[in-house]
Image: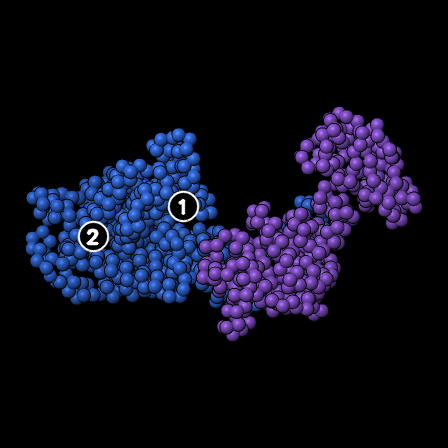
Amino acid sequence: MKKQQPTSIRLENISKIFYDRSRNAEVQAIRPLTLEIKPGQLTTFLGPSGCGKTTLLRLVAGFEEPTTGKIIIGGLDQTNIMANKRDIGFVFQNYALFPHMTIYDNVSYGLKLKRLSPSKVKEAVGDVLEIVGLSGMEKRFPNQISGGEQQRVALARVIVTRPRVLLFDEPLSNLDAKRRIQVRMEIKELQQMLSITSLYVTHDQEEALAISDQIVVMNKGTIEQVGTPQEIYSRPKTVFVANFVGKTNVWAVRIKDNRNNVVEPERGGPAFRVLESLKGFAKGEKAFALIRPEAVKVAPLSSAEQEHLRGKVQALTYLGEKVEYDLEVGGEKMKAVVYDPQPKTVFKPGENVAVILPEERISIVSH
Amino acid sequence: MSASSNKGGLGVQPSTAASPAGRRINLRKYNPLALSISVILWAVLGLFILYPLYKLLHLALIRDGALKFDSIARILSRKGNRLALYNSLKLGVFVACLSTFIGFIFAFARTRANLARGWRWFIDAIIILPLISPPFTLALGMLFAFGPTGVLTYKLLGIQGASIYGMWSTISAETLTYFPLAYMTLVGVLENINPSLEENAFSMGGSRLHVFRTISLPLSIPGIANSLLLVFSASLADFATPLVLAGHQFPILPTQAYLQITGLFDLRGGAALSFILLVPSLLIFILQHYWVSRKHYVTVTGKASSGTPTRLVSPGARYLLLFVCLAMSAFVLFLYGMIVFGSLVKAWGANHEFTLVNYRYLFTHGLKSIKDTLFIAFIAMPAGGLLGLIIGYLVTRQEIPGKRLMEFVSLINYALPGTVVGIAYLLAFNDPPIMLTGTATILIAAYVFRYSPTGLRATIATLQQIDKSIEEASTSLGANMLTTLRKITVPLILPSLFAGLEVTFTRAMTAISATIFLISVNWTLITVRILESATELELGNAAAFSVFVILTVYLVTNALRLVLRLLGLTTLQEKTALY
């Protein structure tokens, strides 16, 4: 299969209001938002259930109409174009294979609608089934193959039509953990090979980090942050993002000096410096300081070579590759993770330790 | 924007602008086509289900504009009627228990005894016979075998004037008729008990009997309860078998109601008897529909790993099960053989010379009833099938007001005993404003509204399995609405339409309990002719009519299945469970 010129997607001021008949009320599923999807990339919509990510995907597919805004695909306004004219491939959560058709008929369905000659249909179906590793299964019915195989048929059925855009709605949620990792790598490889602009909906942060070129974190119908997996993980812009993608320590602080980047904890304790510029904050403004558990360093009090806080080990979980500590630092609870722990350096509950917070690893986000 | 009722975290906020009037039904929010169709359906359901029921209840319970139970009291003051009520309940309990017991043996053998494929096929073939025959075929067979001139009693044992009529022969014939119903309810339940549960109990050291008693039996209790209820209400409603076999010593409610109306012309009394019959039937239906069947479906979803041979059945028990099943099957087959034999001899019990005179009678004197029945059945078939399909589609795929109620009302005539429906129709359509007595319409309507629920239930079950995303997948692959309907939706629901067609046709050919009140000089039915012949002991004619009905039903249902297969579609997997 050849690469094609990748397509861009732009969502302009998109919003969606549903009418909930059971409560006789309107529900705002998506608040007005604008989003640019780069061509050829795989972009993930990540968020908890009900955040509007699937609705956004269905709006792009044309299964729903936006209440306001425009959907621009490949530079053309597609807002009023029917779903069957958008040239988009949609991979459903439950695969949505046609149960009364064989694998061959399922995969050739879109091609036949494009009125291709039978020989070309046969060739294309044969090619795509080879790519997804299902050659020889043409005559079977969907209920005669495994879940993983059904997933591949669903994928083959959409990529065989060479759509401009691929949409994935939690495609791995019906697979077991091991298959999930395997299939997500396959999806990523296939997407890169064909370089089709793709949108991918998931609530699994690990999946999003592993597969995406760009992640859009959503919550309550709005976008919380857009960025690469590294940006989202290491520089979360909100407490929600920091908590949803990975684990994080959060504590309330007040900006003490916005020029020299100094903050002080709300509940007292020594002020500290961060590397991040605080020019965007006013002096005395309330904020949150965030630090990942694995960025927190724990050392014996005796060897305190640098600026540190005093902490006390409350509990620990030894997991072989790492130790997770529950610490108490200046009246606040804090989690720390130490990788590759050696028997001598594992602290005991009740022990006092030096807690070092590297200034370059602390993020300050607004309240 | 009012945030007061925000459920938080879900990003949903009810807008205060949406509805100042609260929960008022806003008709503009519904699809106009679906809404108009539902209005028409309500009119039809109202006319053919609610109106007759109202007329019946009115006559039975209302006098001088007030609720009075004196009609009921008057009916129950008669000893014969009290006896009939008692007999009906007794009959129902016996038949329900026996049928469920035999059905369980069959179902257990079928699912656990590792029977050879040939035996399983044989059992399934026998099981289907009572379902496609007129309801009193087995009663007729009993007459041939054990009646005054019966093969076994008279010929073999030389008993003169053996009396077959009474409770025990009624119980036997009904049990043979209804155990397939119990079998089909139970086979689904037993198939869905995960064999690993039984194996697990085994590996923990339980004996075979212990495993059966503590695992298999308790897990099939919902199925057993369902089977008991189904067979009890079927027996309570059965009219034809007692009419042939019960005799004068064993009056039951449906026959008593029939005599009250056709013999004594006492419409109010008939209505009162119907009411007494209606109450338990409707209660059982509600219990079965909303309680047992729900529980039942939960266990049925998700295909369990069936087919793994279990060692639950010891070799000895296996042969015992096989023997019991084969003996029962052979007996059923023997009774059917009696009917075929009886249709081909000159005079049953006296002259067993081969003759076609009974079939000649069928196509001369019986020709009118054959023509009438076929006409009615072939009109009722598409009407019943389509009605079930449309209501099923409407209540599952469209937003219309009161759709749950519509589903329930559609099922009422199916839940009520045929006798009650027949009397209600008689009361409703005998006088203006709507006079239908003596027409084919009333017979067709009786069948359509009584037997379309099978197709309706099949349609609902099928549509609930077809996720909306399947249609969306077709759309996003480039198909327009019509193509999606033609290539996806219609092929997926056609099997349930065909199931509806099959059942409506079969019942229009075989059922009698409702329509016996509605026949006239203009329109008569084969089943009524069979009953007349049977009660007048013209058994040869009755047998020939029965053979004709069974063959016709067999041919037409198989033709329907063939059409479905030629369309490249499979029949519904549990097609037998539809009856």
**Subunit that carries the residue with mark 2:** B
Q: Which chain is purple?
A: A
**Which residue does the image show at 67% across and 34% down from the upper left?**
A319
Label 2 packing within 10 angstroms: few (<14), some (14-19), many (20+): many
**Which residue does the image show at 20% across and 52% down from the upper left?**
B336
Q: Which chain is blue?
A: B
Indicate which disc, 1 or 2, sits on the residue closer to the N terminus. Answer: 1
Q: Is residue B10 left or right of residue B419?
A: right
Q: In the rendered view, would you say B372 is above or below B1?
A: below
Q: Is residue B160 left or right of residue A152?
A: left
The image shows residue A304 at horizontal and vertical percentages of 85, 31
**Which residue does the image show at 69% across and 66% down from the upper left?**
A7
Q: Is residue B217 left or right of residue A147?
A: left
Q: In the rendered view, would you say A356 is above or below B397?
A: above
Q: Which mark is residue B306?
A: 1
The image shows residue B238 at horizontal and vertical percentages of 28, 47
Mark 2 lies on residue: B336
Q: Nearer the viewer, residue A140 or B462?
A: A140
Element under disc 1: loop
Name which quarter of the figure residue A29 lies in. bottom right
**Which residue does the image show at 48% across and 57% down from the upper left?**
A142
Q: In the rendered view, would you say A212 is above or below B290?
A: below
